[in-house]
Image (tube, rainbow, N blue to C red):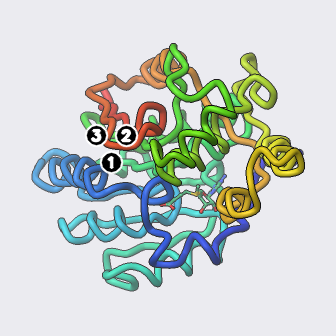
């Protein structure tokens, strides 16, 4: 298994109509990002510079709108180009675009007032890489600066579905929408089969094979399988238990300030935002 995973769904992800939750931050989540971007741009002690781990267009636009330099770092040239083309401020003098591995970033110490990771840490394949990226963040974020993340974190109690038949039934009865149906199948329902509680690795490839099996057994129909396969990406993710994640970050010189779970989808229970401040 390669340690670095290229993102192969740029074509689909980079379409304007697909800039919806869960793929993109919701309106309220964007407001949450903006709240901290605004604090940075108004605080005379903090550098007016934001690092975006990835190419997320909405947050890059928000940073520039507030007068901060936005540096986006993504390993995929295609993702960078597709996402940049969705921006209002693409090519603005404050819009910096760097194609690189996050683990190889080399910025001066305390250069950034804020680092934003929109579903970024989840795409690292191991605990070692999570820690490595965090150490980099800790070095390049100025004192009192922020680290904000939106990603899958597993709370102590599994707040998702445990029973696939119930999930399909609720979806067909319109008790839940396509977003929750997708997220449950993608990140939760097969947790006991594809998630390693020791390494926190979630085997996305195996997960999609199990979804295929559901289709072969007529548990989901063609349309339902197509819905989940639309964004298929056979990567290995790392999903931390909430307490472990907070502990790891706080041990690197941060303090957790707050978290934010949007409504109304069920998946916001475990795909949510967290903000930390550098001590
Ligand atoms: C799930 S996407 C993030 C979703 C995105 N924030 C959005 O708004 O749609 C993951 C992104 O991280 C990038 N990526 C994954 N691993 C990386 C690494 N080690 N270094 C740099 N970029 C990486 C991928 O190329 C991809 O663009």
Residue 99 at x, y percent in the picture: 61, 69
Instruction: Of the two numbered discs 1 and 2 on the same chain, state the one appearing first in sequence.
Output: 1
Q: Check disc 1: other Cα within 10 Å, few if <14, some if 14-19, many if 20+.
A: many
Residue 145, label in figure: 3
Image quarter where the N terminus lies is top right
For the residues labelled 1 and 2, say whether their Cβ atoms are less than 8 Å apart.
Answer: yes
Residue 193, label in figure: none
Residue 271 at x, y percent in the picture: 47, 39
Which element carries disc 2, helix, strand or loop? strand
For the residues labelled 3 and 2, say whether their Cβ atoms are less than 8 Å apart.
Answer: yes
Instruction: Give the quadrant of residue 91.
Output: bottom left
The residue drawn where x is 39% and y is 43% is 265
Specify whether tag 1 is near ligand 1 (CB below 8 Å): no
The residue drawn where x is 50% and y is 70% is 18
For the residues labelled 3 and 1, say whether their Cβ atoms are less than 8 Å apart.
Answer: yes
Left or right, 119 with respect to 144, comes to: right
Residue 62 at x, y percent in the picture: 26, 65
Whole-angstrom CA distance, mark 1 to mark 2, is 6 Å
Whole-angstrom CA distance, mark 3 to mark 2, is 7 Å
The residue carrying mark 1 is: 114
Q: Quadrant of ligand 1?
A: bottom right
Residue 147, label in figure: 2
- Comparing 255 with 30, the one in front is 30
């Amino acid at each position: 298994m390669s340690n670095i995973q290229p993102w192969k769904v740029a074509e689909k992800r980079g379409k304007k109509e697909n800039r919806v939750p869960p793929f993109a931050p919701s309106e309220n989540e964007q407001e949450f990002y903006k709240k901290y971007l605004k604090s940075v741009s108004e605080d005379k002690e903090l550098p007016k510079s934001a690092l975006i781990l990835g190419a997320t267009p909405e947050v890059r636009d928000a940073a520039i709108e507030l007068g901060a330099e936005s540096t986006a770092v993504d390993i995929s040239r295609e993702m960078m180009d597709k996402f940049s083309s969705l921006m209002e401020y693409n090519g603005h003098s404050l819009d910096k675009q760097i194609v690189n591995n996050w683990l190889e970033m080399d910025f001066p110490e305390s250069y950034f007032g804020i680092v934003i990771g929109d579903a970024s840490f989840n795409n690292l394949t191991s605990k070692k890489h999570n820690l490595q990226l965090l150490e980099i963040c800790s070095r390049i974020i100025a004192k009192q600066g922020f680290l904000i993340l939106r990603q899958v974190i597993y709370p102590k109690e599994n707040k998702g579905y445990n029973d696939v038949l119930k999930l399909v039934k609720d979806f067909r009865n319109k008790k839940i929408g396509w977003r929750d149906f997708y997220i449950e199948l993608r990140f939760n329902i097969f947790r006991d089969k594809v998630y390693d509680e020791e390494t926190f690795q979630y085997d996305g490839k195996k997960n999609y094979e199990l979804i295929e099996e559901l289709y072969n057994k007529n548990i989901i129909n063609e349309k339902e399988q197509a819905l989940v396969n639309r964004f298929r990406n056979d990567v290995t993710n790392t999903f931390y238990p909430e307490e472990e994640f907070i502990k790891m970050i706080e041990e690197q010189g941060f303090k957790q300030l707050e978290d934010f779970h949007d409504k109304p989808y069920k998946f916001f229970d475990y795909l949510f935002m967290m903000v930390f401040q550098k001590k």
